[in-house]
Image (tube, rainbow, N blue to C red):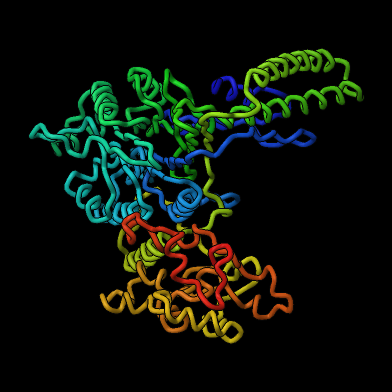
Amino acid sequence: MRTYLALLACVAVAGGPACRRAPTDDRKVIPAPQGKVQGAAAPVATVAPRGKQIALLYSSNGDGDYEQCGCPVHPLGGVARRATVIDRARADADAALVLEAGDLFLPQRGNDADGKRPDAGEIERRARLLAGAYGRIGTTAMLPGERDLVLGLPALRRLAKQQHLPLLASNLYGRDGRRLFDADKLVDAAGVKVGVFGVTSPPAPEDAAAFMAAGIDARDPVAAARDEVASLRARGARIVVAMVHVGNADANRKLVSAVPGIDWAVLGHSGMNLELPEKVGGARMLEAMVKGRNVGRLDLHVVGDSLAFTDRGERAQIETVLADHRSQLTEYDRRMGETDPATMRDYYDQRRKEIGAAIARETALLRSLPAAITGSWFENRIVPLDAATPDQPGVAILVDAYNKESEKRAAAGKPVGLGNDAPHPKAAPGAAAPPAGGTYTGTATCGGCHAPALAFWKTTKHARALSALERIGRDKDPSCVGCHVTGYLQAGGPTNVADARQRFANVGCEACHGPGSKHGAALDKRGTLARGVPEATCRGCHTADVTGGDFDYKKFVHAIVGPGHTRRGGG
């Protein structure tokens, strides 16, 4: 089914979209069907009960990237945007698992500027940033890929321990015959036990020397995966998720097909964009391309006790392709009725027959699918990390501190980056102002009209947020201050730590509701500020590394609302 739909999306029709070119090192893109086309009916959403919602956020092949790509038209990517997507999923779902399937820290060989290994200090500095970001996000498990292992075991283990980044690998052993990392993890996700494990491949020839020097023994991944499935099932896992990083697309497929009992496989290294999960045996494979430009989100809705999942997105995909083909058929009819040369009529007639046959197949497929789902179901999305996704403040301050350090190093003539980096994005002229034209005014200004709310705010921990850093001597640390002041690094807010500490100390009104200048100046106040503050906004600073993953929004929101500060919508 997935292959059929992917081929439909790339059907060679005159004037139709072409498949995107495959990336290098056999990482190919499986394109998704195109969205709504002119004159085509929108897909009809399949009715389905919510059940228990478990969100699985997945990525791989980060290649050391941490910010948006340097594309001038549609820049994608960024770990701070990724964090926002994950925060939103945690707010939506009953449970969330965050999985990284390898090659996070270093680019693939041959992708750097001159083919040489980047500066060792810069490798460690970038890895520290990425480990810190993924730890702050609250990663459930990461499988080290070959480009992570060449950091060296001591550095990798140290970073993982410092940043609370759980590493799993079932088939990696050391010289002493012991596993280098935990073999698996059993997670209680909204009352459903989910088992997670990972297997990686032996090193490529260019990395073999580094593996040997480190004493890394990559044993048979198939045998290790079979053992893990049996072990996790015996311990009560009802859903088994494998992180598979054993080579190109065919190698990953071969492993998944050889290991019965895997339900979902998050792939690394092969670099596919699987908007429709690819079914291999009893498993479905997931992957979200490369370089952190997208993040995959799989939502499992467990209805009753059944774990036989129906793909809710399948009907929408077929309906989209069918609408596109009907639109193309109408276009060919129009061309045949106009003044096109007679020599083109045979071509148009042949294309009409081919598209008509495709429409018949798609119509039959739709008839075979249920219009309503009564049992458990899933929906998979590849979320592009574009400008529509804001940066999460907690990770954004890590990125900003890293970039400021990079600027100082570059000014001193020291190496910066991994050799394949685009310059980190600079603000465009006028970008300091938010889209609505507002700027941050400060909590005292808000209190001029909202005295009861200000009085209550002064009794909360938000009003003493900066002093919490002062007590531990970190009130000038740019990697911390952003979440203990208001508006730091936000459009219309302070851009340096000193200004933020002096004029916008503590977590004030605008930290939750947005910049207040437009609200203060408007005669009609409605719509000028965010009144109902979404849970994801709070998670932007109440990050997993700070809260230990135990942030109960419904409980803690009541600690910051009170007289003059409505509870409606949580804000």
Residue 62 visible to the viewer: no
Q: Describe residue 405's horizontal placement relative to residue 169 as left or right.
A: right
Q: Position of residue 254 (x, y in %)?
A: 37, 19
Q: Residue at x 50, y 36 (%)?
A: 301
In the current view of this chain or complex, which residue is farthest to the front?
Answer: 304
Instruction: Give the residue furthest to the left.
Output: 176
The picture quadrant where one finds residue 404 is bottom left
Left or right for 196, reference 320: left
Left or right of 208? Residue 360 is: right
**Above or below 247: residue 300:** below
Residue positioned most to the bottom: 448
In the figure, 60 relative to 261: above or below? below
In the rendered view, would you say 217 is above or below 293? above
* Residue 450 pos. (x, y %): 58, 82
**For the C terminus, which image quadrant?**
bottom right
Count of residue discs: 0
Q: Residue at x 48, y 54 (%)?
A: 84
- Identify the residue shown where x is 33% and y is 76%: 476
Provide residue 180's location: percent of width, then percent of height.
17, 38
Is residue 516 visible in this depiction of the protein?
A: yes
Rendering coords of residue 538 (x, y %): 46, 62
Residue at image position (88%, 23%) is 340
Q: Nearer the viewer, residue 402 or 157?
A: 157
Q: Quadrant of residue 251?
A: top left
Q: Is residue 49 above or below residue 348?
A: below
Position of the N terminus by quadrant: top right
